[in-house]
Each structure stands twice: as structure tokens, then as C-alpha cells.
Image: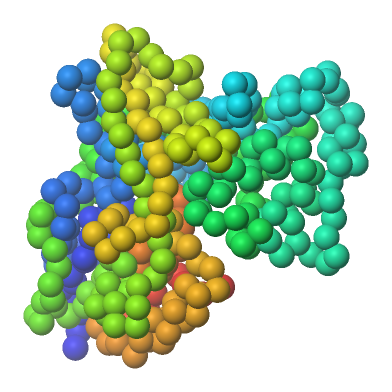
Amino acid sequence: MAVDRVIVAGAGLSGAVLARELAEAGLGVTVFESRDHVAGNCHTARDPETGVLVHVYGPHIFHTDDAEVWDYVNAHARFMPYRHTVRTTVGDRVFSLPVNLATINALFGLDMTPDEAEAFVRARTVQPDGPPRTFEEQALAMIGPELYEAFFKGYTQKQWGVHPRDLPAAILKRLPVRFTADDSYFPHRFEGIPKDGYTAMVASILDHPGVDLHLSTPFDGDPDAAHLVYTGPLDAYFGHRLGRLGYRTLDFEHHRAEGRVQDCAVMNFGDVDVPQTRITEHKHFAPWERHDRTVWTRERARDCGPDDIPYYPIRLVREKALLADYVALARSETGVTFAGRLGTYRYLDMDRCIREALDCARAILAARRDGAPMPVFSAPPLG
């Protein structure tokens, strides 16, 4: 059957970009979104009492080295310059993250040069027998016990609900350690935040005459669709028949106050006995605005239940085995492509969501043109 009509389940970043690209190519696209807004977990909304633009589901900062993706988002939003920095509270002291020269000197009460700090930290590392296998082994091999205990152990245990020795080393490998004064959280060429928020940006992406958008309308099957692009949870598509893939979810407590409550957008809390993982103060994301009052959000992580919003795929041994079974089921399906972080059960930054959606749309169009099989996944979920 020639594909001339596509259903897209989900109006987050992945679904929106796929819908737009397929509509640009002349296909009719219908988008179903179960929430009452687009943009998924990067949804932003003005607080009616303070006027502050709130990152409703947690902080999102757009950063990338992908020039095509950067051009894509700038075609749909006016991006303002923004440089993200993070602080962490340990005990009654505040430090900068990622771990950098100032962090190291402050923790140890020293005044080392970059070369001295690098040699100092290297001398304190604990190397395992063979490659590091766990988060804890990786941390001890990178930064030694003092930095690990202060900045990673407690925070990680709260975020993932397990001891760091039970997490894979790969989780830590992407976190930088710098022996300079650079405290920029992200190392990428392009970084910014859309002036009017992410929801307005995603609404612009979906604003095409070939896209028919239905909010507050969960996808429940459409026998007339020639092809389905599904961006919901992979296991939910199959009715969880093999069991539920594990996620961590987040609880948010939104508060208002006069002035401001902290001098940065995001404050982590490294102590395991402090319940929150971080506090976000939203007006710091828009330094070009002025607000007398503020909105701040306390964030806690926990295991995701059936009625919770899934945020972070756990991807430990049990989940990877179950994922492999669901991937096999997906490959036996016809007429559906699974896309995005939920459809492929992977954590994805926003720029990766857009890159993979662009590539997936091109693969769908190429398969349609050539009469070839449609892609099953926007990117391989295993590995």
C-alpha cells in the first residue's frame, strides 16, 4: 500500500518534527496527543501570578554541536543567548558543577593551579582491576573518593533509587571533569533558550496545513492510516504484555516567593539525607526578563508507577532483557515506526530527539519512494 497518510502518536519534539517533515513532503498527517498541550516534557507555560515562564516538567536547556538542528530550531523560535551553570549544596556549602578547578580547590581548601589540581586528583584516584564496570568504580577511577562522596554518591542514589555500585559505568562517562575555571555545564557550540518558550517553538513546528493536530486525544488505533509513527512508550504499545519497562519519574512542588531564592537556575543537593535532588528557579532561564516575584520548584525522583509520567529509562540488566523482547515484538509489526525517547527506551537530549526525527522522516520518505520496508525504529534501541 502506498503511504499517503500518516498517523503520529505524540506531539513532543520527536512527533512534531516527524509530522512537520512528512507534511512538508506532501503526506497528510494526523497527530494525536493525550495531553492538553504540545511539546511533551519540555512544555513551558507562563505562571499567571508572577508572569515567570515555567519549565513545567523540569529544566530544559537547548545545546548542540549539530548545525542543522540548531538552524532548524531557530527557524521556529527566537533563541536567546543563555549559558547554563549549576551549583550543588553539600552540607552547608555551595560548590560549582561540573567538577572544575574552583570545585576542587574549594572542597580541599587549597589554591592549586590547573596542572597541580590534575596531578592532585590523579594521585587520589582508585583504579579497579580491569575497566570500570560500575558507576562507583568509574567515579573512583576518575576523581577519587572525596569528590565522589561529596558530589556524586548521594545525588546519584537519590536520582536512580539504587546504590551507585549497582549502576553501569557508562552513566558517569558523559560527565565532564575540568581542571580549569570553566564552569559551563555544556561544552557545545550552540546553546540557548527560546524567548517565548519551548511550547511556542513546537507549536510553530506543527503549524502546517498538512498537519491535523488533536490535543487531549490519546491515540487508540486508526485502521485507515497507511502508516503509524508511535512516540509513546514501547511497552505501552503492546499493552505491557511482557511486563513494564522500568522508568524513574519526578515529583515537582512549585512555589512562589518575593525576589529570588537562589543565584542560579539549578541547585543540586548532594547529601543523600536531603530529600530533593535539586531546586529550579525558573526566572534565571530568562535573564532578559524582569520579575519582582519568582517561581521555584523542588524536585524529587522515584520509581515510575503505572499512572506516572516516565522520565528516565532505567536500562539495567532486567530492563535490557525485557527491552530485547519488546524489540523482537516490534520487528514483527507492520505499518508502524517507533520513535523518540519513549519509543526507543533511551534518554535523549532535545537536539538528539530532533536529529533522529529528521533522519527518521527521511528514511520513511525514502522507503515510500523506493517501495522498501519502512524503518521500525528511529534509532536502534539496543546497545
Q: Position of residue 86 (x, y in %)?
A: 54, 30
Q: Number of numbered discs present?
A: 0
The answer to whether one can see residue 223 in this image is yes
Residue at screen point 41% across, 66% down: 246
Q: Nearer the viewer, residue 3 or 333?
A: 333
Q: Residue at x 50, y 29 (%)?
A: 267
- Horizontal side, residue 147 vs residue 40: left or right: right
Determine which quarter of the picture holds residue 330: bottom left
Q: Position of residue 104 (x, y in %)?
A: 75, 29
Taking 207 as reference, is 169 above or below it? Answer: below
Q: Which residue is at the far front? A: 273
Image quadrant holding the N terminus, namely bottom left
Q: Quadrant of the C terminus?
A: bottom right
Q: Is residue 191 left or right of residue 80?
A: right
Q: Residue 52 is drawn in which quadrant?
A: top left
Q: Position of residue 122 (x, y in %)?
A: 87, 42
For residue 118, above or below residue 350: above
Residue in view at x 44 percent, y 79 percent: 322
Query: Colour mode?
Result: rainbow
